[in-house]
Amino acid sequence: MPTVNPTRMELTRMKGKLATATRGHKLLKDKRDELMREFLDLVRENKRLREKVEEGLERANKNFVLARSTMSDEAVKVSFMAPKQELTVNVGSQNVMSVNIPRFTTQTRTSDENDIYSYGLAFTSSDLDTAVASLAELQPDLIKLAETEKSCQLMAEEIEKTRRRVNALEHVMIPRYQENIKYISMKLDENERSSQIRLMKVKDMMLEETHHYKEKNAEMHPADVAEVDD
C-alpha cells in the first residue's frame, strides 16, 4: 500500500510528477534511439577502418620481414636510431548527444614527405623503404581508428546509462506515481462518499424530527394548542 497522504494537494503534486516523468521518459527514449543510430554508424566506420589498418599492417610487416632478410640486425637498428620526422597529436572533443567524443588532429614537424626516412637510401634495401612508406600512409587511419574506437566506447557507456534511466522511469517511477494517484483518488472518493452519507443521515434525522414534531402538535387538544400559543 502506498505511504502517501491522501489529500488533494498531494494528488496535484503526484500528477505533476507523473507528467514530468512521462515527458522525461519520452525525451530519454528519443535520446537513446538517436545515440543508437550514431553508435551503429561509428561501429560500421570502426569496422571498416580496422580491416583497412590490419591489412596495411600485415603488408608493412611482410615488407619489414623481407628487409630483415636482406639486411643485418645492426643495420636495421642503426637505420632508425635518429628519426627526422616528429608527429604531434592534438586532442579535442565534440559534443554528440551530450557525449564528448574525442577529435584527434595531427601535426608534423616538417612538411617534407622524405623526412619519414631516417636513413640514407643508398645503404638500405628497397623493402625497408616500402615498409616505412606503407606505415606512413597508414598513420592517418591509425589515428582515426583510435578516435573512432574511443568514441564507440564513450557512446556505449552513455547508451547504457540512458537505457537504465529509461527503464527506471518506465518500470519503477511512472508505475509508482500512477499507483499513488490511484490510491489517493480512491481515498478521496471514499471520503466524499462517507461525507455524503453522513449529510444524508443528518438530513433524514432532521426531517424525521420535524415530522414527529408536527404529528405531536396535531395530536394535542385545541385548547392545549391555544394555551401553548398564549
Image (spheres, rainbow, N blue to C red):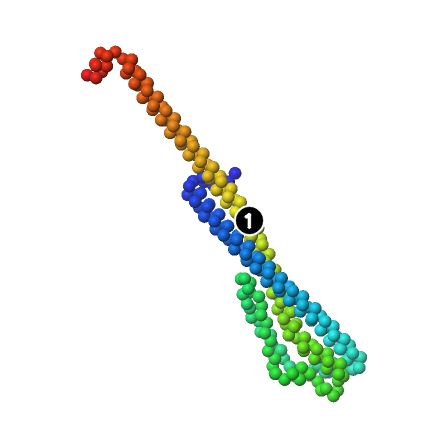
Q: Residue at 55% of width from left, 47% of height from top?
A: 172
Is residue 167 left or right of 142 when viewed as pictured? Answer: left
Residue 186 falls left or right of residue 73: left
Q: Please state the horizontal and vertical placement of residue 170, each as a whole percent of the image.
A: 55, 49
Q: Which residue lies furthest to the right in this view?
A: 69
Foreground residue among 29 and 11: 29
Mark 1, Cα crowd under 10 Å, few <14 / some 14-19 / many 20+, is some
Above or below: residue 200 compared with residue 124: above
SS at mark 1 in the image:
helix
The residue shown at (65%, 64%) is: 44
Where is residue 41? Give x, y as percent.
62, 64
**Which residue: 32% across, 18% down?**
212
- Residue at 61% in and 83% down: 111
Residue 118 point in image, percent of width and height: 69, 83
Can residue 158 be seen in the rendering of this structure? no
Quarter of the image where the C terminus is located: top left
Q: Residue at the bottom extreme?
A: 122
The answer, for residue 141, to whether it is visible in the render is yes
Query: Does residue 125 appear left or right of residue 22 in this picture?
Result: right
- Relative height, residue 15 to residue 109 (above, below): above
Give the percent coordinates (x, y) of residue 84: 65, 83
Closer to us: 212 or 58:
212
Examine the rendered structure and indicate whether residue 78 appears above or below residue 143. below
Q: In which quarter of the image is residue 193?
A: top left
Q: To which residue does mark 1 refer?
A: 170
Q: Which amino acid does label 1 sit on?
A: Glu
Q: Is residue 72 above or below residue 45?
A: below
Total marks placed: 1
